[in-house]
Image (spheres, rainbow, N blue to C red):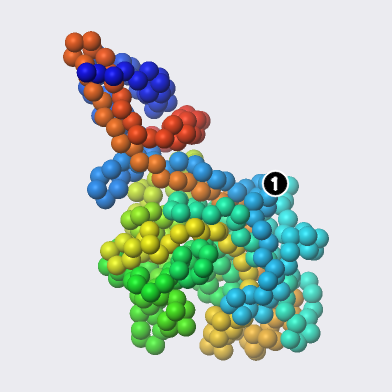
Amino acid sequence: MVHFLPLNLIWLGFLAVTLGISDPWTSDPGHLGQTLSTALTKRNLLNHNPDGTPFLWIPQDEYSGKTFYDRWKFFDAPDPTNGHVKYINKTTAFATGLAYIQDNGTVIMSADHTTQLQRGIYRNSIRIESLATYNTGLFILDLNRAPWGCGVWPAFWTVGGHWPYNGEIDIIEGVHDNQHNQVAWHTAPGCLLNMTAGFTGSISNSGGHNHTDCNALNNDNTGCGITEWSRASYGPYFDSQGGGAFAMKWDENDISIWSFYRAAIPTDITSGVPNPSEWGIPSARLDSSQCNIEKFFANHSIVFDITFCGDWAGNSYATSGCPGTCEDRLMEPKNFENASWSINSLKVYQKRVLTGRIEVNATAGRVVLQMTLLWASLFIFVFTYSTAPCLG
């Protein structure tokens, strides 16, 4: 017996029109499912899990423009990484011009670069954490510049509570005038980086030892890390190229990172219909073959910060080629003129699996669509992609 689902059929017709299918109610409706799949693929919207299950990336949150700071809290406690920094609250940040939004909607977060300090006094700076928490997602940051400079240690990262047991993902991180972004993961014991997972970066190492054990409780919390190959992924060269975009895909299969300098940002990102399957091999990837992603990463907030010296920038200062000492460097404000974030947007997408089939009643010639996709996701998908520019 065939059960008819009118609302699904209405949505099916709307989706067909959205995707440019001129006659969804064809005389051979058995081909409609394939036609929809082809249309989704042509628009570069359809992704597939390793088992072949199709899914879409659905918009969830956007942080941009005049409301950017509305959904963040300003961290003003001592720096857990022992940086020589004084993180300030929201009121002080806006009053002193270290946090603001330009007339064009660009978001600025800066370290203090106007105050001459006495030795031993810490420099004011910003650390913000998202009010929302996430379990998986596609995170895309479009920025014009990221902080850099001798003694400077910025990061864009996500982290769960009860560290390190809910994990940490460092998407952008570096120190001094480095030219290569360093991606890292920090977890509880039991998560390892697969050296053959498929990525273009090189595994971080020290003293000839590859950092493949993500256990933050060992090896002075180095975690497991991958250094990007591109000189445009961090530091002065990244900024001189007009910035770019960083993307982090986190699902049950893997956590992958891509970076694109401004001229190389994929069209699907700028059009608001991202499809990581079109971006090529990621710069860094932690797959699930030796690390249970769902076990080791959960309930993450998003974090931006700018700290100084500390566990990484301080300990590496003597071999960095930077002048003097990190403590001396901290005193002079002009040394921190490049220590700022300039952000256009941060967009978060969620994965929605499409599972369904087309059934045909040969006698009545009617089509029945059975879908398990959430109705909310259907609405968001149709609304978003019906207004997005065509990619093909």
Identify the image quadrant of residue 93: bottom right
Q: Please determine whether, in this image, residue 75 is positioned above or below residue 79.
A: above
Residue 365: horizontal and vertical position, in percent?
A: 23, 12
Q: Secondary structure at mark 1?
A: helix
Residue 128: horizontal and vertical position, in percent?
A: 64, 61
Q: What residue is shown at x 23% (from left), y 10% (from top)?
A: 364
Q: Is residue 163 left or right of residue 212?
A: right
Residue, far front = 1
- The residue beneath circle 1 is 66
Q: What residue is shown at x 29% (from left), y 67% (from top)?
A: 290
Residue 270: horizontal and vertical position, in percent?
A: 50, 44
The N terminus sits in image quarter = top left
Can residue 124 be seen here?
yes
Query: Between residues 169 and 318, which one lies in front from this camera angle?
Result: 169
Q: What residue is shown at x 65% (from left), y 55% (from top)?
A: 72
Q: Please determine whether, in this image, residue 300 is positioned above or below residue 115.
A: above
Q: Please determine whether, in this image, residue 358 is positioned above or below residue 324.
A: above
Kind of residue indicated by mark 1: Lys
The C terminus sits in image quarter = top left
